[in-house]
Image: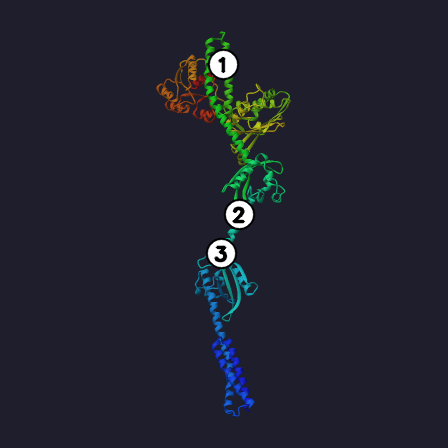
Amino acid sequence: MEAPILGISVCLQFAAAFFALRLTRITGRRASWYLISSAILLMAVRRSITLYAVLTSNDPRPLDMQAEIVALLTSGLLLIGVILIAPIFRSFRRIEELQESEKRFRTLFETSTEGILIAETKTKKFLYSNPAICRMLGYSESEMKQMGVVDIFSGNAIEYAVSEFEALERKEKTHVTDLRCLTKDGRIIISDMSATIIPVDGKECIVGFFSDVTERKKAEEALKWSWERYRLFIKNFQGIAYEADILTFKPTLFHGKIMDITGHSADEFLNDKITWVGLIHQDDLASVMQERKKLVLTPDYVANSEYRIRRKDGQIRWINDIAVVVRSGTSEATRIQGTIFDITERRELEKKLLQSQKLEAVGLLAGGVAHDFNNILTGIMGYADILADELGMDSSLISEAEEIKGAAIRAADLTSRLLAFSRKQVIQPINIRLNELINDICKLISRLIGSNIEMVFVPGKDIDEIHADPGQVEQVMLNLAVNARDAMPNGGRFTIKTESVVLDDRFCIDHPGSKPGKYVLLTVADTGIGMAQDIIDHIFEPFYTTKGIGSGTGLGLATVYGIIKQHDGLIYVTSETGKGTQFEMYLPAVESEIISKPDEYEDHIEEIGATILLADDEDMVRKTTERFLTNAGYTVLTASDGAEAVRLFEENASSIDLAIIDMIMPELGGIEVIERIRMIEPGINVIVCTGYGGASQPEKLAEKHGFTLVAKPFRFKELLSTVRRALQKDE
């Protein structure tokens, strides 16, 4: 009986020790339960020794059955206690774990940099909000608990936000982008949200994690706009942006108008079908390569080259190539970057401008020489007339005097041409109908060019009038006709055409010096031998001629150029060897108006007794004019400058009937003299002599100040006629 009881007791104690050992994992209190388990295990070992002794009958002493029964009951109770206490400790452990988990969640919730909102799915009201979302929206936690989903979105975004919220609720998605949230102070922020559905406090809730992506969106938009600007820039870039190898100069990247400028595609360069160096004009290749070497070897150097390339279609184009070297952190040259622009049009415009400036400079020189020469010729012609009068027609020397006058007249014609070229000639412009003027001189032109040349006139219909000197326009036509005749020794066609045109801003950009507006286009063309470009570059220069010695003065086209320019017109020439020449002349159009002819006065032979104030700074002109007027019976008061002229007029105002004033004088110019003497005598008649027109515009000044204009060099009989007509105005 003792042995079974003892065996059961041992088994119970071993079981209690085992379950006690398991409690160390459940409760987490390892030291305590290790001790308890060890104690129970020792008890079980002790009982096992006793049981062994009983079974081997080595110990004749009988056991205390009552004590063994108590030990058995104790072992059973101990096992039951250990088994029953395990769930309790397990429950305590779960509570601790939940508390620990809640603590971690709360820490994450409170410290998260993302905004977190917990909203009930049914009411869409917020239950919880973390500090990050409060900072993001500008509300306090208590304020957030009074709000719902619709309260944090702007008016336009509410519908989208609610629909996305419902999609999250249906578990159709877990992420929503570009939510436009409304802050407390009225700002709009853009956020992305990830969400999940969990039960909270027994309610089904959506937990949303909000990320403020406003700055990122701005950066994305800025990057997008930057890329769009870059795309548009490259699309509209009128040049070529390139990158090239540092050693071979082979392009490795192209953007822009590569096809427009070169006629080749970018692929042709990148696939080695064509090389950039191969396009460069042979005459420019050495200088370009020298510049590239300098670019690579010189730090911070910017290569700015202008050179010619040959397009795929054979055209020669001028380009501007600006390049820099990109270097590594160790200052090692790695690649070349640059831009290329087609500057062919600019070079052509510069060429035209340079030619225009050269002609302007030559014109100023020619005008100055002609002006001084006119004063000398006036004296020569005057003294020749005086000499002829003194000698009389019966003198044996009269022919020599006439030769002097003839030579002076021919010299005057030469200076007239120089002044025409320099646009300093005195002109008498009126409103004229160009078609009528050309019709009047067609017969003269036909006789001039000869019967072997066909003349064709194509008048424009209802063309505008022009304000021009008819004689000067006739001179233009005759000079061009002579040139055309010489260019067609074997016959041909000489064509004159007129039409009204309007020049726009595009034309003016392409043709420096032109102004937009209405013009009459006068086109003169021939089918002659034509001209090469190097000749065209010089044809308007005075004394330039392609004719043989003694066959031309070289002033014909220079005179045409000067006359057109003096009339504020434009002149262009196109020609090709063997294909003829065409001149296009644009003359400003004016509104039609009736121009009254100047009054005609009878030329009385004698006008004795009148007193004339004569002012001229050139001694020869002043002396010859004084003598002629004195011989004609006039009293003459002379002044050598403007100040002296005013003083003489102040002293003799009551007796002076007429003033003859030189336009350009020292001290005071002619206009200033007129203004001052008319302050003394408003009705005084004035004749102004000048050999210099152009910028001073004596014709307009004559109209403005009411004086009669006489061009130098003048014939003295013509001057006397002008004096008599001026004096007759007072009668």
Q: Secondary structure at mark 1?
A: helix
**Colour basis:** rainbow
Give the percent coordinates (x, y) of residue 458. 60, 27
Q: Foreground: 336 or 359?
A: 336
- The numbered disc on residue 405 is 1
257 or 73, which is in the foreground? 73
Residue type at numbered disc 3:
Thr
The quadrant in which residue 622 appears is top left
Mark 1 vs mark 2, foreground winner is 2
Q: Quadrant of the C terminus?
A: top left
Q: Position of residue 227 (x, y in %)?
A: 53, 49
The residue tagged with tag 2: helix, strand or loop? helix
* Residue holding disc 2: 229
Assess disc 2: are there few (<14), some (14-19) or many (≥20) residues with their C-alpha within 10 Å of its C-alpha. Answer: few
Give the mark, 1 or 2, whose residue is nearer the N terminus: 2
Find residue 214 and name its label.
3
Residue at 55%, 20% (x, y): give it: 553
Label 1 crowding class (10 Å Cα cut-off): few <14, some 14-19, many 20+? many
Mark 1 and 2 residues: CB-CB less than 8 Å, in contact?
no
Q: Residue furthest left?
A: 651
Q: Residue 2 is drawn in which quadrant?
A: bottom right
For the N terminus, the quadrant is bottom right
In the image, residue 544 sits, relative to residue 351, either above or below, namely: above
Task: Work out whether mark 1 precedes mark 3 in sequence or the reverse, and give the earlier one.
Answer: 3
690 and 50: which one is in front?
50
Q: Position of residue 571 (x, y in %)?
A: 55, 29
Mark positioned earlier in the residue sequence (3 or 2): 3
Separation of marks 1 and 2 at Cα, in angstroms: 77 Å
Q: What separation in Å lies between label 1 and label 3 (alpha carbons)?
A: 96 Å
